[in-house]
Structure formats: structure tokens, C-alpha cells
Amino acid sequence: MINVGLLGCGTVGSGVVKLLGSNQDSIAMRVGQNIGIKRILEIDTHKVAELGLSETVLAASIDEILNDEDISIVVELIGGIEPARTFILECMKKGKHVVTANKDLIAVCGEELFQTAEEYQVNFYFEASVGGGIPVIHPLKQYLGGNRINEVIGIVNGTTNYILTKMTQEGQEFARVLKEAQELGYAEADPTADVEGLDAARKIAILASIAFNSRVTFDDVYVEGITGLSPLDIEYGRELGYVAKLLAIAQEIDGRIQARVHPAFIPQHHPLAAVNGVFNAIFINGDAVGELMFYGRGAGQMPTASAVVGDIMEISRQLYRGTKSSASCTCYMQKEIMPIAELESRFYIRLTAKDRPGVLAAIASVFGNSEVSIATVLQKTSGEDFAQLVLVTHYVREADVRDALAVLKGMNIVAEICTVVRVEGEL
């Protein structure tokens, strides 16, 4: 019997208990022996009772799990930085293998956790930290390990993808769709981590670290959220052949890593353009394998529990066979982080300007002086004194675009710089 200690029995923790119970026989056959939850650390005892478990499994403190020599694997599902960090480190120092879904912790404290796991010769698995039930961490570490990964692009937040999908399909305003998402349970009461891109930034930091073999932390990721996008932008984007998505992007460019999260327009034929609702997808480009896309439910009780149980099973197989994991930390290099100002991209720019002769030429001149080349122009005249101008640039440096916009903001012919969105991929 492989005994597991569970830290936290909330939504995902309950799912883990259910999955280990409902598929107990097949899991045992695949692993070689039974897996059981021996202790659960959970403040809300009702959660444990609702699962039909005896009160004897409840641990009064972390010490009951730390000092139980029969517990080989500890699953941390508390979330947040503390006390999760301290609990995990203490478990490792006791020789216990650890499984977690804690993206916040890994994106901030990953180096410390991996070093401690290596020092005490224990496994540290975290498949559920990115993409919920989508298996991407292990494939990226193991089966794609022979590739040089060029880029990782993902839709890794179901809340924002749901919001943008509804805005695209129904033309609704952001605030209205957000309220609907909260009512359906797709968005938290405080949606900041989702709509401001923070959740996606933590996930791309983890994926970038694995893909490029160099530590990337949350603070290294450039982040923008979706709150500035309007149905008008989405409609103009559609007219130009694009779909709006919140993308998490990591690339290695000339030996440096660029990691960013922001809204982007992608061509309607791009595989990620068809990823709608609460679904996630991660697009990987490797020099040998070419293009791959991992698609599925990126959150939810049972999809996330599926990934957690997969990690538990992998460690249990090793314990049963007396083998040691080779999936240790792969961040053996130190690569520089490329500033967002050096990004070369195409840009969608919507601004409101005076509707009179010579204005478009003056605006184009400002962009030209900043080495920003314009590829497409849409002019939407409303019959009033101002018109909507939509510009799409060729590939240009981010810093040059920002310089041009700073000049335009000071011109009396420009009423407002409404929206700036990067454009990814070719039509």
C-alpha cells in the first residue's frame, strides 16, 4: 500500500479523493499496488465528512503527516505561497515525495523547491499547475526533451477565454460577460488574477523554465490583461481576419528568453483561434517535432484531479519498482530575459482623430518618423467631427511604437489612443 497525505481537501482535493476511490482497482493494476489517503490536513472537517471518510483520517496538524513514516507521498492543494511553501519543504526534508497543483508557488519559489527536492532525493511533481487536466509538463520535460523548443504559445486561462469568446460571438461588453462568468462559477468574486493576466503569467513562467532550460519567474513575465478590449475592437479585428485571445507566449530569441501575457489578434485559421469557452490549449514548436497542440479542460475539479492522480501514480510506480525519477529540475542554464521594449511584432492600433483632410497623412508621418511602417488602415467615419482610425503595422519594435504613440498623444488632431493590441501569426 502506498500511503498519501493530503494537504487541503477543497475542490481539487475532493476530486483527488473521489478519483482514487472510484478508479481504485484499475489504478492499483497500473501501479502495482493500492494507493490510499491515510491523513488529510483540512480545517473544514465537513468537507472530509461529505466524502464519506472517517474522522480518523483528519490530521490535527502538519506534524502528524510529517512524522508518519508510512506516508510516502504528500499532495499539497492548499494553494498560495504560505504555509504551502513551508509545508512542502518540511515534507521533502522528511524524505517524502511531493505532488502539487500550486502554480503561484512554483512560479515564485520554484528554484528553492527543486533544489530541496534534489538535496533530499525526493520527487517533486506538478503536472496540474499548468493546464488543469491537459498533460503538458511531463511531455515537455521528457518526450520533447530531444528538441530545441522555439516557442510556447498558450490559452491557459479558461475565465478570460470564456469572456473573450462571449464578446466575440455575441458582441457583449466586458463587464456584462464578466458578471455572467461569475454567476456561472467560471470567474472568482475577485477576478483580478484572471482578467489582468496574472494567472496566465504564472503558468507561462513555469512552461518557459522547462522549455528553455533556464529559470523564468513570475516577475520576468510582461503582463497585460483583457479589460481594455471592447466589442468594437473585436469587430474590427474580425473585419481584418483576426480573432482576439489572451495569449501566454514564451520564445527564445538569439539565446535570450521573452515571456509575455497579453491580448493578441491571431488569424482566424490559427489552431488557437478555434479554442473557445473555458477550454485551454498549449501550442509548442520544436525543431524536430514541428508543431504540437495540447487541448482540453484547463481547470475544474476532476480535470485537475486527473493530473494530480497521474503524478501520484508515477511516483507510486517508482516506489513499487525501487527506481528513481529522471524528471528532475531542467533549469541548468542561465539565459537573459529580453525586455518587452525589444519585441518585434505587428500591432493593431485604434485611435480617434479629427475627421478632416491631412489628418491621416500627419499621423502616418509620426509613425514613419519612429520607423513604424503601416500595413493596413481602416477609417470609420461617424458623420461627426471625429473618426475612428484602425491601423495595423508591419513588424516593428515595441519601443518604436511606444515612441510614436507618445507623440500622437500630444497632438491636438488626436482625441484618444483607444487600443493597442499585438498581432501574432500571418494571415
Image (cartoon, helix red, strand yellow):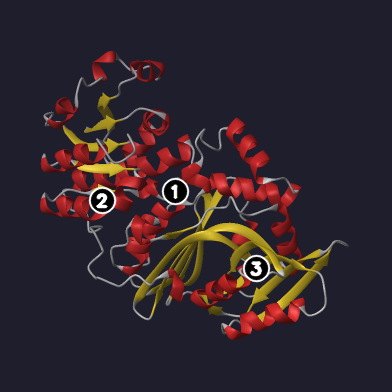
Residue 373 visible in the snapshot? no
- Please name whichever residue, 278 or 111, is drawn nearer the observer in this view of the structure: 111
- Please name whichever residue, 293 or 232, is drawn nearer the observer in this view of the structure: 232
The correct choice, above or below, for 57 with respect to 144 in the image is above
Among numbered discs 3 and 2, the one appearing first in the sequence: 2
Q: What residue type is labelled 3?
A: Ile
Q: Which amino acid does label 1 sit on?
A: Asp
Label 1 residue SS: helix
* Residue extending farthest right: 383
The correct choice, above or below, for 183 with respect to 416 in the image is above
Residue 349's label in the rendered image is: 3
Q: Where is residue 198 in the image (x, y as percent from the top left)?
A: 44, 50
**137 left or right of 186 in image:** left
Q: What residue type is labelled 2?
A: Cys
Label 2 residue SS: helix
Which quadrant: the C terminus? Answer: bottom right
Look at mark 2 in the image and give the residue it sits on.
109
Look at mark 1 in the image and give the residue it sits on.
199
**366 left or right of 113 in image:** right
**233 left or right of 81 in image:** right
Residue 138's label in the rendered image is: none
The alpha-carbon separation of the residues under discs 3 and 1 comes to 26 Å
Among numbered discs 3 and 1, the one appearing first in the sequence: 1
Q: Where is residue 379 in the image (x, y as percent from the top left)?
A: 79, 70
